[in-house]
Amino acid sequence: ETVERNDLWHALTPQIFRLDELQRALSTALAEGQQVTDEASAMEHAGYQPLLVEGHHDNIKITHPDDLALAEYYLDNQGK
């Protein structure tokens, strides 16, 4: 099935929340056996509606050594 792409978005890091609210949401999700995929899903489960802020495609997460080459490419080509 093909999904409507206009209704999709790509989540980027970092996700930012008030520490006390995030800790409470994560603790509650854990205590209730809820499966959360990230901080935002824990907050949604706790009744919060995270604010979405438009990001940039070159805001990448460096997790693996190969990610460094892509980061260097973006840095070398800024403003071109």
Image (tube, rainbow, N blue to C red):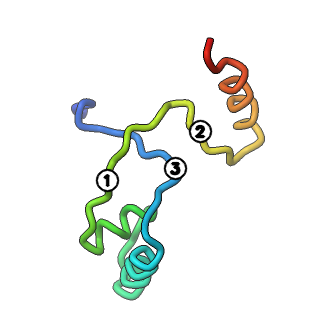
Indicate which disc residue 60 carries. 2
Identify residue for label 3.
13
Separation of disc 3 and disc 1 at Cα?
Answer: 13 Å
Q: Nearer the viewer, residue 6 or 22?
A: 22
Q: Which quarter of the rendered picture does the N terminus lie within?
A: top left
Mark 2 or 1, nearer chain start: 1
Query: Looking at numbered disc 2 in the image, what kind of residue is underneath it?
Result: Ile
What residue lies at 43% left-to-right and 65% top-to-bottom? Answer: 17
Q: Is residue 1 visible?
A: no
Q: Nearer the viewer, residue 10 or 1?
A: 10
Q: Which quarter of the rendered picture does the C terminus lie within?
A: top right
Identify residue for label 1.
51
Helix, strand or loop at mark 2? loop
Please determine whether, in this image, residue 26 is positioned above or below residue 72.
below
Nearest-to-viewer mark from 2 and 1: 1
Q: Quadrant of residue 26?
A: bottom left
Image x and y of residue 41, in percent = 36, 63
Helix, strand or loop at mark 1? loop
What residue lies at 48% left-to-right and 45% top-to-bottom? Answer: 12
Image x and y of residue 63, in percent = 68, 48
Separation of disc 2 and disc 1 at Cα?
Answer: 20 Å
Separation of disc 3 and disc 2 at Cα?
Answer: 8 Å
Indicate which disc residue 30 carries. none
Which residue occupies the extreme bottom position in the image? 31
Please determine whether, in this image, residue 8 is positioned above or below residue 63.
above
What residue lies at 69% left-to-right and 32% top-to-bottom? Answer: 71
Image x and y of residue 78, in percent = 64, 20
Neighbour class for label 3 at 10 Å: few (<14), some, many (≥20)? few
Neighbour class for label 1 at 10 Å: few (<14), some, many (≥20)? few
Query: Looking at numbered disc 1 in the image, what kind of residue is underneath it?
Result: Leu
